[in-house]
Amino acid sequence: MLRLLRNIGQLATCPPDRPQSDAGLVEHAALLIEAGTVAWVGPESDLPEVPADVPVHDCQGGLVIPGLIDCHTHLCFGGWRGDEFALRLAGASYQEIASAGGGILSTVRHTRETSAGELQDKARDVLDQMLALGVTTVEAKSGYGLSPEAERRQLEIYRRLDTEHVIDVVPTVLAAHALPLEYAENRTDFLDQVCEQLLPTVAERDLARFCDVFVEKGAFTLDEGRRVLECARDLGLGLKLHADQLSDGGGALLAAELGAVSAEHLEYAGPEALAALAAAGTVAVSLPLASLYLREPFLDGRAFLEAGVNVAVATDFNPGSAPSFHLPLALTLACLNQGMTPQEALMGATTVAARALRRQDRVGSLVPGHQADLALIDAHDLNHWLYHFRPNACREVFKAGWPVHAAIGD
């Protein structure tokens, strides 16, 4: 079936083969969809002849962008941690809260105590709200179970949501997120459990596409992270790494050495790490909402881009350090605090984010052959959208060429 979108004020095609600084902007554009994929895109004045009975969607001079991709979230969790927000405002650090029994382990306790149905309903509600913002693909990490059974439960929820929800959910196993209390005195046994019991089951049952590890003071060491990631690689899982978020601990260098698809956070990564990431082709996933909430330095996006590293922009949605799934806000923060232009930021949440999920050949761009996931924004161009922040400027969302969400009143 054909569908024509016309009267587009500005269209961001976000081609996967362009520099991050070039979002492939087309003024006064049109876009033709066939069988769920982009068939033609360009200035409306160049539109080829189409059959008279083709459904036409008038975009009323708005901005059309690829469906946004949030390539780093912790979607499924029990409880919230608003009390820690007040503690941080009073001066407590992330590490101090964690050492007092808060932080990740607090969410682990709540997640283990919450039923699978309640967890799934909560995550589905978040996906509904993300879709309304123009998000069409979401990476979702486990890591709030920290036992084989509880980790599998999170990943099984992601599998069901991927099947039932219009948003594509890409699962990542983050079993080495923190050391659970029951293994506080025996780290080796916990890592044995992850590598010898959980990861083989995850790979055999195809419960995750990637494996992630939190390498940081108070979490896991470089050697421990290497062990988990090498095991995951041998099982055929793609590699990701929480790295250098609170200190320069060498996590980014490890990600580059192992050929990880992405290294995430990276606020404290040094020049040597930037060069290594560029050489390895590893995507740097920036998380400006986490920097905002933790009052930590923002990633220097300009330095990464100038070093030749692609920089994705994601939310890090989780109940503690980034309790917001507002990806458009993260894009504005990336412009204001990470030295990124609007085009670089948008590319970071579309084709670069797709690269961080190994999906850049099918989503994240509006070029012929790519899936027609797109959002219609109530703004005349990209600059205005990211400059004039609103609760939600997204008017409509299309998934594989079909309208799947419209703002009330449109």
Image (cartoon, grey):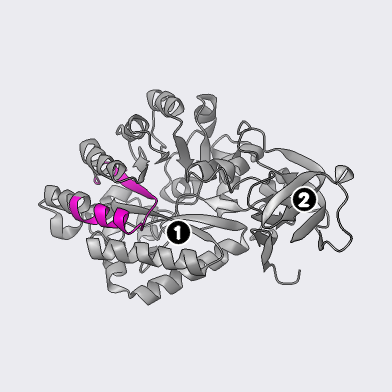
Q: Which residue is mark 1?
A: 323
Give yes or no for residue 199 being in the magenta stretch.
yes
Q: Is residue 265 magenta?
A: no
Q: Residue 317: x, y in percent?
A: 45, 56
73 lies left or right of 37? left
The number of callouts visible is 2
Cα gap from disc 2 to disc 1, whole angstroms: 36 Å
Write down the residue under mark 2.
31
* Above or below, comparing residue 116 to residue 365 in the picture: below
Q: Residue at x 74, y 40 (%)?
A: 25
Density class for disc 2 (Cα within 10 Å; few <14, some 14-19, many ≥20) is: many
Mark 2: amino acid: Leu
| Residue interval drawn in magenta | 196-219
Q: Residue at x 78, y 53 (%)?
A: 62
On the image, the x and y values in percent for residue 345 come to 60, 41
Task: Left or right? Give the position of 223 relative to 61.
Answer: left
Q: Choose between 197 and 297: the one closer to the eye.
A: 197
Q: Earlier in the sequence, mark 2 or mark 1?
A: 2
User: Which quadrant holds the N terminus?
Assistant: bottom right
Q: Is residue 301 rendered to the left or right of residue 18?
A: left
Relative to 299, does residue 35 appear above or below in the rendering? Answer: below
Q: Residue at x 20, y 57 (%)?
A: 180
Q: Position of residue 295 (x, y in %)?
A: 43, 46
